[in-house]
Amino acid sequence: MIVPRLRRGRVAVANASPTVLSAAQRPAAGTELASGLRSCRSALAGVAIFSGVSNILMLNGAIYMLQVYDRVLPSRSVPTLVGLSILAAALFLGQAVIDLLRGRIMTRIGAELDGAVSGRVFSAIARLPLLTGQHGDGLQPQRDLDSIRTFLASPGPNALFELPWLPVYIAIIWGFHPTLGLVAIGGAIVLVVLTITTEMLTRKPAGAATSSGIRRNTLAEASRRNAEVLAAMGMRRHLHEQWHEASREHIAHQQRVSDVVGGLGSLSRALRLMLQSAMLGIGAWLVIHGEATAGIIIAGSILAGRALAPVDLAIAHWRNFISARQSWRRLRQLLSRLPEEDAPMALPAPRSSLTVDRVAVSAPGTQRLIVQGIEFQLDAGVGLGVIGASGSGKSSLVRALVGAWRPTIGRIKLDGAALEQWPQGYLGRYIGYLPQDVELFAGTVAANIARFEPAADADAVVAAARSAGVHDLIVSLPNGYETQIGEGGAALSAGQRQRIALARALYRDPFLIVLDEPNSNLDTEGEIALGDAIKRIKARRGIVVIVTHRPNILASVDLVLEMKEGQMQMLGPRERVLAKLVPLQPANNDGLKRVATLPKLPN
């Protein structure tokens, strides 16, 4: 027999949890990005200093040319030329080192910002579908954070640090001659106007490109998830046409942005070269009239090009700047919408009852009630079966029971305390949930059963597998509990995934177990194991709620709730409810709880 390769007592499945900040220490919702950037202000100050030193060293080339033309050539002094050349080379190397350090610091600032905000972004990605439903590209917040980090590591931010030096260069050029200074000012004004024009012409198409890109990614992800359906039913071509239309729209908007940025960028580079040539021509005119030296012609041209380089750099990276700015705005709005939840005081472990108090439920992001008027109480050691036709609201009800969906009306309580009063991570220890659509995660079988709990107890993992009747199946896998199951459990069959997910629901013997169609993919052996697991839950004074269409699994429950059109139709002991539903059997109505039928739900 293959022994599970787990360390007795503990098995490491994840890194330690990040440090949790108190409410007073956390930044306000929506200000996390700004707060993360402020925490790097000393590094940003260092980048500003490096940029200042780099801009001073940028004068090296102009001064070198000025000295060569005005000193070396008239004096024909080779030692002076050699000395100036060595000094200029050393300064150029120093500038290269400073630029290298500046780039490395900006890369680390991006990584620091990512580390400060990534936890909140991940939490928002996980919580957003529970509040707004499955709409749009769910991974867009992560892409937005990547876009901001990538922009910070690019040459684009250098323009922001170098633009303040533009007046300094113009002042030096003015010192050479006021006419040269006026020409440089005129060129700077033209390039600034080009930058403003770039912003005005790209703002709308850039936003449209982002929206169409999200639609395209959503279609592609849906096609990837449902690849088998598309292949089996010949739907790939139809979905491809929709994707192609969204892609065409996305590319069209991107092309417009690229055309504007590329066109104005080319114009700005041409104007900068024209300005440098104009500085040479005007400088020559001044030399002819005895108002300047030959060195001033070359030095002025170099300084004019250097003064306007940040504007040219800003236009060249304008597209990345727009993308980062849009990402910043979207993340700020998302984090403002989903503030970090304060953890309430931990309550004692539930052990006595589950109360559903006149609950109504609607899907996240919608107003239409799917379930309404649900009211019952289950004591410890009781099993409830929920039955009804498809679309009667069974799955919506159990999503509310486990806290995945919040009730629109009413409250769900454990031991008299509403679910909202429990810290979410703490409450999860006492709830086991097997959804109708089973989802496992890339990792080992053991890690999935242990819910990726850091340093999980191996004995508890094996106990959960035995409770689900899946231990023998697991140890028959190539690497037992250490078998990698792939994304979504792709390496397992549907029945194996369902049984391992059942073991995950039973891990550490939670008080409330909710199983939605737990036997939909099970064979006879699996159904027997499921029935035994339900009996053990009840024997240890847990509460189990089962949604099913198969009446054979109801033999393990005590009560049955029939639902119809989102409302309670009948609630009572199993035998009497089933007898009432099957006309051929004698029905004893004693002990049944009749529920008043509410008006039909609006569509």
Image (spheres, rainbow, N blue to C red):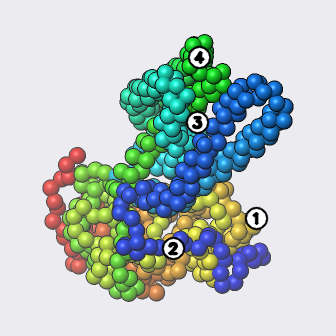
Q: Amino acid at mark 1?
A: Pro
Amino acid on which disc 3 is placed: Ala
Query: Helix or strand or loop: what does disc 4 sit on?
Result: loop
Whichever of labels 2 and 4 marks the residue nearer the N terminus, that label is 2
- Residue 365 location (% of width, % of height): 31, 51
**Residue sitting nearer the eye, 286 or 337:** 286
CA gap, disc 2 and disc 1:
37 Å
Q: Provide the residue designation for mark 1.
A: 478
Q: Which callout, 4 or 1, points to the residue nearer the camera?
A: 4
Label 4 belongs to which residue? 290
How many C-alpha atoms fall within 10 Å of the one at disc 1: few (<14), some, or many (≥20)? few
Sequence-first disc among 3 and 4: 3
Separation of residues labelled 3 and 4 (CA atoms): 82 Å
Q: Position of residue 477 (x, y in %)?
A: 72, 65
Q: Nearer the viewer, mark 3 or mark 4?
A: 4
Residue 231: give its label: 3
